[in-house]
Image: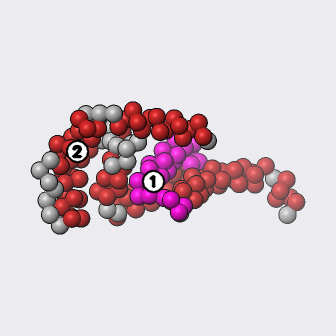
């Protein structure tokens, strides 16, 4: 055992494994928390993707490809629309995490939310639904001060931490 402990390759291997296991350990703790919400799950998937895509060493490639493949497979199997809607309806994120995805523009997001509304409530959304969604997504109308209030709440929370 002491030979193993004195071997620098042993410690390198331990460090390498820790680097690959730390992100999913963090994700597991986060998603199993009592206060975890559906939007947190998708943000955690994004966090994992960012972590693993930043591992560029040649010895990481095999593990990274397998892990990213597993995350993508799980994403393909889930109800993506619900997760996307949960992020969009989170006042602090809205469409920001999807800004690099052209298909998730305001028009398509409105269509997505209309479909989900009809599915959940078993009837079409009210006539003012589109207009209110547009105001919400663009921070106009009755939602024009919402972004400012969110930033104030965020700053207040950061001061308490």
Coordinates of residue 79 in the picture (x, y in percent): 31, 62
Q: Residue at x 21, y 40 (%)?
A: 134
Disc 1 vs disc 2: Cβ atoms closer than 8 Å?
A: no
Q: Quadrant of the N terminus?
A: bottom right
Is residue 64 visible to the viewer in this orientation of the structure?
yes
Seen in the picture, residue 152 relative to 125 is either above or below; the reply is above
Depth check: 60 or 77 in front? Answer: 77
Q: Say what secondary structure mark 2 lies in.
A: helix
Coordinates of residue 96 in the picture (x, y in percent): 36, 39
Residue 57 colored in magenta in the image: yes
Residue 57 shown left or right of residue 66 in the figure? right
Find the magenta span and give its range. 33-60
Residue ID for mark 1: 40
Residue ID for mark 2: 133
Disc 1 from disc 2: Cα separation? 22 Å
Q: Main secondary structure of the magenta part?
A: helix
């Amino acid at each position: 055992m002491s030979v193993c402990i004195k071997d620098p390759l042993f410690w390198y291997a331990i460090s390498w494994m820790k680097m690959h296991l730390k992100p999913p350990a963090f994700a597991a703790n986060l998603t199993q928390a009592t206060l975890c919400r559906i939007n947190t799950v998708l943000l955690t998937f994004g966090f994992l993707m960012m972590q693993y895509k930043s591992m560029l060493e040649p010895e990481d490639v095999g593990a990274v490809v397998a892990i990213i493949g597993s995350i993508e497979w799980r994403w393909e199997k889930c109800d993506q629309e619900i997760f996307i809607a949960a992020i969009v309806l989170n006042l602090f994120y809205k469409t920001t995490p999807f800004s690099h995805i052209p298909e998730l523009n305001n028009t398509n997001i409105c269509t997505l939310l209309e479909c989900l509304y009809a599915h959940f409530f078993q009837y079409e959304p009210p006539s003012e639904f589109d207009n209110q969604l547009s105001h919400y997504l663009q921070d106009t109308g009755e939602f024009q001060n919402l972004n400012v209030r969110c930033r104030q709440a965020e700053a207040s929370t950061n001061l308490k931490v």
